[in-house]
Image (spheres, rainbow, N blue to C red):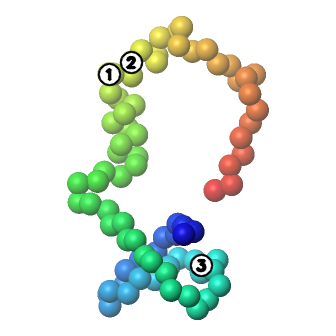
Amino acid sequence: MKAIETTGIINARGQLVLDEPLPAVAPTRVRVVILLPEETDIDEMKWLRAAARNPAFDFLKEPEEDIYTLADGRPFYGQG
């Protein structure tokens, strides 16, 4: 079975509306799994701020942990 991940919304009539067309040959039957955000989920920025302030990661601020320079590696230009 091939998996395709996409996003969409559930409209007021309870219908799933995808953000983009599916790259599939139609018509065909599909199986759909819907993942809904939970009320207790925190957004990514809040999670990142909490992790950045967590004292468990304070050791990363020590000079001996700073092992990379701007001359290391190559630039990454992501598409997104």
Q: Which image quadrant: the N terminus?
A: bottom right
Which badge, 1 or 3, comes first in the chain's sequence?
Answer: 3
Give the x, y percent position of residue 46. Answer: 35, 45
Amino acid type for the residue under numbered disc 1: Pro
Up the image or down, 3 lies above or below 54; here it is below
Q: Secondary structure at mark 3?
A: loop
Q: Secondary structure at mark 1?
A: helix
* Disc 3: which residue: 22
Question: Which residue is at a point 38% across and 38% down the rendered structure image?
Answer: 49
Pick out the residue farthest to the left. Answer: 40
Residue 58 numbered tag:
2
Give the x, y percent position of residue 44. Answer: 40, 49
* Disc 1: which residue: 55
Up the image or down, 47 lies above or below 7; here it is above
The one nearer the camera, 22 or 20, is 22
Q: Secondary structure at mark 2?
A: helix
Q: Are marks 2 and 1 in contact (CB under 8 Å)?
A: yes
Front position among marks 2 and 3: 3
